[in-house]
Amino acid sequence: MSPFFSKNKRYHDSGWFSYFLAALIGAIIGGLLVTFLAPGLLATENSQNLRAKPPMEEVNEGPFQEEGESNGQSSVIKVVEEVGPAIVKITTVNRQLTYDFFYGRQERRVTGEGSGVIFDKKGYILTNNHVVEGADKIKVVLTKVNQEQREFTGKVVGRDPITDLAVVKIKGEDLPVAELGSSESLKVGQLVIAIGNPFGFSNTVTTGVVSAIGRKLEIQKGTELTDMIQTDAAINPGNSGGALLDSQGRVIGINTAIIRGAQGLGFAIPINTAQEIAQELIKKGKVVRPWLGIYGVDLDAGLAKEYDLSRDEGIFIAKVVDGSPVDKAGLRRGDIIAEINGEGIKSMTNLRNKLKEFKVGQEVKVSYYRGNKLKATKIKLGSRPGVNNR
């Protein structure tokens, strides 16, 4: 046995106790340190972890929004790239004669600008009547292709003042053509894209929505456009004749009118109407519509009282055209047209819109007042003679 243990028993016992005591004190101190320091360490570690790992919503939300916006922009960009070249700029020159006291008769050149849509590979262009009306010279400019503009001389195929539509033709090869869609299934709120040449700025693109459908708009005295598409896409002077497109790039309307002084208030002719008129203009050079053959005045209470008339509503016949359908049916000056096929007629605009529903040669029942007596007769509709809209 080792001398260290055998010779000093007391020292051996006291050494064992010292080790035990030291271990106990160490355990107590260690426990106290864990109790007081561990929560702080854990809290610090947890807070670092929280900062390093943000909530899932924050991580995913940003990319989702960017993707949606990117898709919307890509859709518009794609439409513009594909359809833009088929939207043309139309410049017109109208020679007007003026008289000057010192220099006598002089010629003045008046220029105008508008837009158009190539809708047929043969070079047919849809535009507005007011863009080309009275033009002596028409220049058509296509979008820049490979940094070069293509210019053509345009010729009016036919015009229709009633719908404010016209068809112009150019001769060229490899012409871009816009796809015509349908205006029957339009929904209020759907995205639309307008392309035109406002104030001479070629191929300007604006976006918006269909604000309303089926609007009526009087473009001049006695001429009312019906079933118009209303949009908040910016349409300015020079946009007339340009395209209103859906999100797929299909033409759904021909931009035609704005209300001056109002923002976000533009109108377009439905493409279904425009396409029908265009085909008739290409085929006949004009649109043949039913005709009665009268000059009429809208009645109201004031006129009825002033001229001691039996009615204060309807159309007062001021003149009957010799040989017209109305003349052949026996109506005369002073009669008041009240109904056509049972539907009340209150104005000349109302009458024109009603006649659009019929074809030349159809018979309609006309109810009218002669004095206090209500009469009715059938009239075979004719076509207006001597109309030249080329």
Image (cartoon, grey):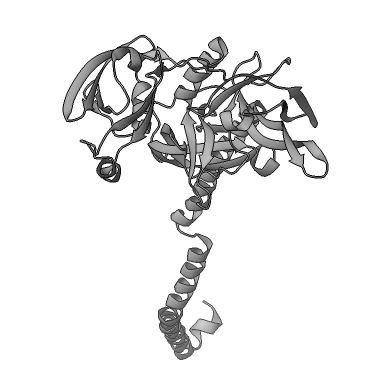
Q: Quadrant of residue 368?
A: top left
In this rendering, position of residue 179 left or right of residue 216: right
- In this view, the residue in front, 14 or 255, is 255
Q: Is residue 112 left or right of residue 106?
A: left
User: Looking at the rendering, which quadrant does residue 110 occupy?
Assistant: top right
- 66, 140: nearer the viewer: 140
Percent from the top left, x then y, of residue 36?
Answer: 42, 82
Q: Residue at x 39, y 38 (%)?
A: 188
Q: Is residue 372 left or right of residue 158?
A: left
- Position of the C terminus by quadrant: top right
Residue at point 32%, 26% (across, down):
333
Task: Give the residue furthest to the left.
Answer: 373
Q: Nearer the viewer, residue 34 or 112?
A: 112
Expressed as whole percent of the image width and height from the top left, the position of residue 67 reads 53, 43
Q: Where residue 207 sits in the image (x, y, percent)?
A: 54, 42
Q: Residue at x 28, y 30 (%)?
A: 345
Count of numbered badges drawn on the protein:
0
**Residue 165, how many percent across, how many down?**
54, 26
**259 lies above or below 347:** below
The quarter holding residue 326 reads top left
Viewer-closest of 107 and 310: 310
The residue shown at (50%, 51%) is 262
Q: Is residue 127 visible?
A: yes
